[in-house]
Image: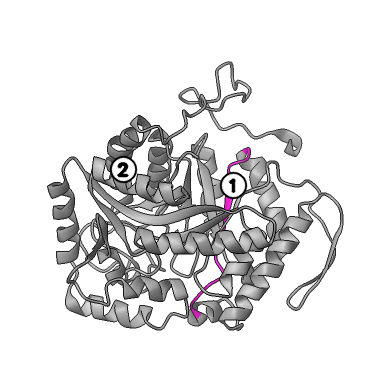
Amino acid sequence: MSVHLHWFLPTGGDGRTLVDRHAYTDGGIRRDRITPVSGVRAPDIEYLAQIAKAAEQLGFEAVLTPTGTWCEDAWLTTVALTQVTERLKFLVAFRPGVISPVLAAQMAATYQRISRGRLLLNVVTGGDSTEQKRFGDHLDHDRRYARTDEFLQIVRGAWGGAPFDFNGEHYQVEGGLTALPPDPLPQIFFGGSSAAAGPVAARNVDVYLTWGEPPEEVKQKIDWIRGLAEKEGRTVRFGIRLHTISRDSSKEAWATADRLLDALDPATVAAAQQALGKSESVGQQRMLALHGGSRDKLEISPNLWAGVGLVRGGAGTALVGSHAEVADRIEEYHSLGIEHFVLSGYPHLEEAYWFGEGVRPELAARGLLEAGPAPLDGVPAANGRPASAPGGAPLLIAGGR
């Protein structure tokens, strides 16, 4: 089992501090009203293209794009970026409660043809009722997961190549069909720490994602989901979502973490903790419990730092250390069964290079990475030169094949 490395597209904004929605006066909706915070970068398509191209050049397999009010739309943003990259895959996050499952199946099929098979799907059920209601979704936490279960059954049914009927509590579909199913079928990533989430993962998904908890807690999650999947006669693979601060020396890495922490004033931390504490997400509550809102003892496990979670929702921990130390921690998680590592760092462009040029060679030397294929191996030449040659435009296959 090799390690699969993925990066992150900050479609809600980026910067040299632990920037999240608090950096914008209006949540980032209007780009001309950015609070004067040093180093804040708006998520313009040109900047996101820089990150995507860097991730591809550095050997990352895919980039995760988030979903929500404070982000650009993941489908539209990433399909645009397929036109300026060649091999990079896009892990598109979306909420199943705000889109028809048959339409989602059709969108995925179209995306696969446009991108030549570079779509991965990250299903986000949603743990914040306020956010869900903003999109017209009024179900409670557990019913949202029950709906996700039905949603994923319908998506896979619609990809089957024949009319598909479904009669459930949340969806009734007659003759659901994707005329040209996606090829290949996108892998489905999914996360959830609640009792309602586990069975959904076991029955439907390819990769179960957890946020970056200490190894012993991650192992408990893996054992839980693996046991549920075995009862369903299925095998589920595992991934983890982490930030990284990797430098040539451990001292440099921790100095960077300290600088990020020093930039957070107590009022910002208190406001963020109050808002995050209202979340219904069990995973979010587990993230908050790692630090309890305190700046003390943020290294909760060797090289695992919980400082990001003081102000950021979702993934709240970072691997901090020398390139070798960060590789050690990845190897430790890998030994537990983690295959996919979805990583990020502030700012995302520079940290991609720190990791790609520092940690990736360490992992390769340990035999944890597969040798990648030649760029666009097997893709026809364009304009008399390989499609991967400098200046070669991405090739769109006519007729959907």
User: How far separated are the C-alphas under marks 1 and 2?
Assistant: 27 Å
In this rendering, would 203 be left or right of 309? right
Q: Residues within 10 Å of mark 2 (few under 14, many from 20)?
A: many
Residue 358 percent location from the top left of the image: 27, 37
Callouts 1 and 2 close, C-beta under 8 Å: no
- Residue 386 visible in this rendered orientation of the protein: yes
Which residue is rendered at x = 49% and y = 70% of the image? 193
Q: Residues within 10 Å of mark 1 (few under 14, many from 20)?
A: many
Whether 225 is among the magenta residues is no
Whether 120 is among the magenta residues is yes
Quarter of image, res 152: bottom right
Residue 163 percent location from the top left of the image: 87, 57
Q: Give above or below for 29 relative to 243.
A: below
Q: Which residue is mark 2?
A: 327
Q: Give above or below for 237 relative to 273.
A: above
Residue 58 percent location from the top left of the image: 38, 35
Which residue is rendered at x = 42% and y = 52% of the image? 9
| Main SS class of the magenta portion in the image | loop
How many marks are shown on the rendered structure?
A: 2
142 or 228: which is nearer to us? 228
First-in-chain label (1 vs 2): 1
Magenta highlight range: 116-128
- Helix, strand or loop under label 2: helix
> Hey, what amino acid is under mark 2?
Ala
| Rendered image: mark on residue 119 | 1
